[in-house]
Image (cartoon, grey):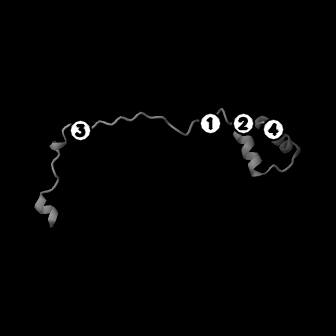
Amino acid sequence: MATLEEVYKVLKEKRKKGEDIGMFGQSYIEMFENKDKEQPTTKEIDVSFQKNENQNTRQPTQNQIQQKK
């Protein structure tokens, strides 16, 4: 079974000879050549949750009579 680098070398040689390597082959070469240059697309963040200890302090935004209308 071929390694990723061996596949890269075969595709690069075929392209050098002028053979059609297709869109997948071209993408594979670009991916292999730029693998160390690309920036990560994910970002790690820290999130914390603080629970309100006094739940009875919340006031309704509208009067009960107004809500029924």
Q: Which residue is the site of mark 1?
A: 38
Q: Residue 32 at x, y = what percent?
A: 72, 37
| Neighbourhood count class around disc 2 (C-alpha, 10 Å): few under 14, some 14–19, many 20 upward | few
Residue ID at (27%, 38%): 51
In the displayed structure, does residue 16 sit left or right of residue 46?
Answer: right
Q: Residue 62 at x, y = what percent?
A: 15, 56
In the displayed structure, does residue 59 sit left or right of residue 9?
Answer: left
Q: Which residue is the site of mark 2?
A: 33
CB under 8 Å between callouts 2 and 4?
A: no
CB under 8 Å between callouts 3 and 4?
A: no
Query: Marks 1 and 3, how far apart in space?
Result: 43 Å
Q: Residue 17 at x, y = what percent?
A: 88, 44
Mark 3: which amino acid?
A: Asn
Q: Which residue is the site of mark 3?
A: 52
Q: Residue 36 at x, y = what percent?
A: 66, 32
Furthest residue to the bottom?
69
Q: Which mark is residue 2?
A: 4
Residue ID at (53%, 39%): 42
Quarter of the figure with the N terminus: top right
